[in-house]
Amino acid sequence: MGLADHRPRLRRRRRAQHLRLCACDARTLEPSGAHVTDAISVARGVSWRVLHTFFTNKAFLLPSVAFPLFFFTAFVGGLSRITQVPGFDFPAGYTAFQFVFVLLQSAAFAGVFTGFGIARDFESGFMRRLMLAAPNRSGILLGYVFSALIRWATVAAVVTIVALLAQMKIGGNGVDLFGLYALALLLNLAGTLWATGVAMRLRTQQAAPVMQMPVFLLLFFAPVYVPLNLLQGWIHGVASVNPITALLEAGRGFISGSPELALAAFAIGVGLIVGFGAWAVRGLRRAEAAG
């Protein structure tokens, strides 16, 4: 009697496994053009949902904007006398000096906050339904990455306007400013891919510290308040090997009109994207295997 009760359940399980295998075979046999179209379609749907939630929910929008503005106001307003320290000779002034850090910080944390959203989608069960419905699951990853980019662009626009209202001096030309924002974009992509990989593996909001803390430490073990040459002791040694330092130095060179370490900074940014891109893709595959 017990075996008979379990037979319908076993048949349903076998049928579900068969349908999943057929779906995988169908995706394998799809033309490459249809495969790309499916990925774009999924990415469009995912990014629209994420951005709609972000722009219509103050609980998500306000912290994303207030966090970098708080740091910008606190650093520029409370630490401006650092410019009087012997050896501090940044030509564009302390407002521009800190603006570069806040811009890069906002880019990285826009990616981290996107990872929080992915973990929340796993806990709510939405991600499981999305993976079952998506004809090309790579589009899920693309959708989250694109939404993180738009989120950061919104925050960056607000921070830039506030900095200009604070009479920030800009010594660089249009090409230099393009380089600055391009560096921030690379860091945004790297932060998003890092957080996505963590969220896909752990699939819980309790993973938030794992996503956030490494990024926070990398940012604040860089020359945040003074140039690298004014740091002393162990913090100088750590900052010298910190990859974020090159991005900060290059960004500050761009805004002051004296670019330096630009090639190294872009190489580091691309390297981070490649490495964390592989990390995120493997995380997606692990989430698929987990069901």
Image (spheres, rainbow, N blue to C red):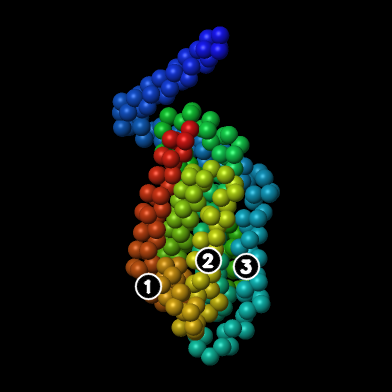
Q: Number of numbered discs present?
A: 3
Give, as a three-letter code, the residue at label 1. Answer: Leu
Image spot of residue 258 (x, y percent): 41, 77
- The residue at which mark 3 appears reads as 71
Task: Determine whether the residue tagged by mark 2 lies in a helix, strand or loop.
Answer: helix
Q: CA distance from mark 3 to mark 2?
A: 15 Å
In the image, residue 74 above or below residue 11? below
Q: Residue furthest bottom?
A: 86
- Residue 272 in the image: state x and y as whole percent: 39, 58
Residue 93: quarter of image = bottom right
Mark 1 or mark 3: whose residue is earlier in sequence: 3
Q: Kindly identify which residue carries mark 1.
A: 261
Q: Is residue 56 above or below residue 93?
A: above
Q: Assess disc 2: are there few (<14), some (14-19) or many (≥20) residues with their C-alpha within 10 Å of its C-alpha.
A: few
Residue 97: x and y, percent? 53, 75
Check disc 3: other Cα within 10 Å, few if <14, some if 14-19, many if 20+.
some
